[in-house]
Amino acid sequence: MKSTNISELYFLFLPKIYNMILVNNTAQDSAGFSEKILETGLSIYEVIRIFNKKPIFLQDNLLRLDNSLKKSNIHLDPSTLHLPDKLEHLIRLEHIEEGNVKYVLHFTNGQMTEYLYTIPHSYPSAEAYRKGIDTMTCQAVRQNPEVKYLNPALRNLTNRLIRDNHVYEVILVDNEGYVTEGSRSNVFFIQEETLYTTPAAYVLPGTSRKRVFDICKTEKISLEEKRIGLNTLSRYEAAFITGTSPLILPIRRINSVLFHPDHPLLRRLMRSYFSLLEKTD
């Protein structure tokens, strides 16, 4: 089978029904599995993008997993988990070509259980990449934001807001009125050829966020981490989100504030990011 062309990323992939889940690297039927079991105790997780039958930017996921474990005072070296081998196992088992895979370390009653399974994915359409997406804000604070752990209350709230208001993403605003991040993404703003984004201490350090930082360093693009007030959004020319599914996706609107999806610097970043993705083949 020929490899997927990068331009095909611009089309919406329909969720596929998968049959198996790996529990401690043992294949089990997924029919009786529910994520509700993970809501007790502590569940630290990563969502990994599969492209052309391979995980992309996996090292970034492992680095973030290591950070989450350390911030949670869990003394565990991610290299001992052999995640690349387990991903290969699941990819072969389910014949995954494109999609998102969730890896969960569930700690409860003094025991750790590993879960690895596919999750439904809905990648942005070609129109979303061209015209940008509509978003809205919500005042909400993610406790211990640097740790990627399951937070069902926040996820349920933002899912409802997305559904009821017909927006693509919800942008979180803290109690001091500063924009932090998306419910499942990081947020960047552009003003006068400089990128701005919230400092890492206030957000989950996304792997796609890191990729943008790497591009800026390589291409000598000005980037500044600073707290961004909700009442200052109209000062910025363009905005975009980054994440496992959207990669880099322009924002057309946050509440009533409009942005320019065709900003030259934003389009340059998108080209550079997708070029990196092609090199993972």
Image (cartoon, grey):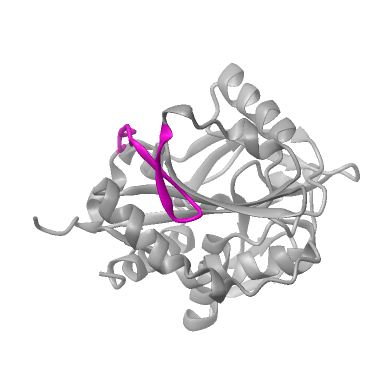
x then y, percent, for residue 135: 59, 34
- What residue is drawn where x is 61% and y is 56%? 188
Q: Which residues are magenta?
A: 12-30
Q: Quarter of the image for the N terminus: give it.
A: bottom left
Q: Quarter of the image for the C terminus: give it.
A: bottom left
x then y, percent, for residue 240: 54, 50
Of residues 36 and 135, the one drawn nearer to the viewer in this rendering: 36
Identity of the residue furthest to the right in this view: 176
Of residues 144 and 66, the one drawn nearer to the viewer in this rendering: 66
Of residues 50 and 86, the one drawn nearer to the viewer in this rendering: 86
Q: Is residue 209 above or below residue 44?
A: below
x then y, percent, for residue 13: 30, 38
Residue 212 visible at all: no
Position of 173 with respect to 21 (left or right) is right
Identity of the residue furthest to the top in this view: 164
Residue 74 visible at all: yes
Q: Is residue 218 above or below residue 81?
A: below
Position of 103 with respect to 149 (left or right) is left
Of residues 45 and 166, the one drawn nearer to the viewer in this rendering: 45
Q: How many marks?
A: 0
- What residue is drawn where x is 31% and y is 71%? 280
Quarter of the view holding residue 184:
top right
Q: Is residue 101 above or below residue 163?
A: below
Q: Is residue 213 magenta?
A: no
- What residue is drawn where x is 41% and y is 55%? 49
x then y, percent, for residue 9: 29, 49
Position of 98 with respect to 269 (left or right) is left
